[in-house]
Image: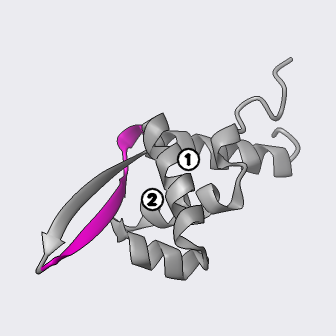
Amino acid sequence: MQSIIQNINKFFESRVRLGIMSVLTVQDKADFNYLKEILNLTDGNLASHLRTLENKGYISVNKKFVGRKTQTNYYATNEGTIAFKNHLEALENLIHGGK
């Protein structure tokens, strides 16, 4: 018998990474300041979680200059979107008793 929690993804156990992926899977992109504001995080905390998701291949980063300032946008990758949807499905299965 398959474990009911087998498909829960450890990368999304953090409320911050769960929040980041929630935003990025419903929006095409989000910039650093928007994520920081909506998730109520410090620069360092957000940057750390973004780096973790990027290293795993779940998000991609695009940096460009707007005037003299750097604008950093984040996107969910196809791999990240699939992994996140599988995680949400696993949670739904857990909530509904594996049905």
The x and y percentages for residue 90 are 71, 42
Q: Quadrant of the C terminus?
A: top right
Numbered circle sitting on residue 85: 1
Nearest the camera: 5 or 44? 44
**Please, is residue 96 above or below residue 29 in the view?**
above
Residue 82 visible somewhere in the drawing: yes
Q: From mark 2 to mark 1, how far is it between C-alphas? A: 9 Å
The residue carrying mark 2 is 25
- Residue 92 located within the stretch drawn in magenta: no
Q: What range of the chain is rendered magenta?
A: 68-79
Q: Quadrant of residue 57?
A: top left
Residue 82 location, x and y as percent?
Answer: 48, 41
Query: Which quarter of the rendered picture does the N terminus lie within?
Result: top right
**Residue 56 placement, left or right of 76:** right
Percent x, y for residue 76? 39, 52
Q: Residue at x 70, y 39 (%)?
A: 10
3 versus 46 height, above or below = above
Residue 83 spot, x, y in % from top left: 53, 39
Quarter of the view holding residue 93: top right
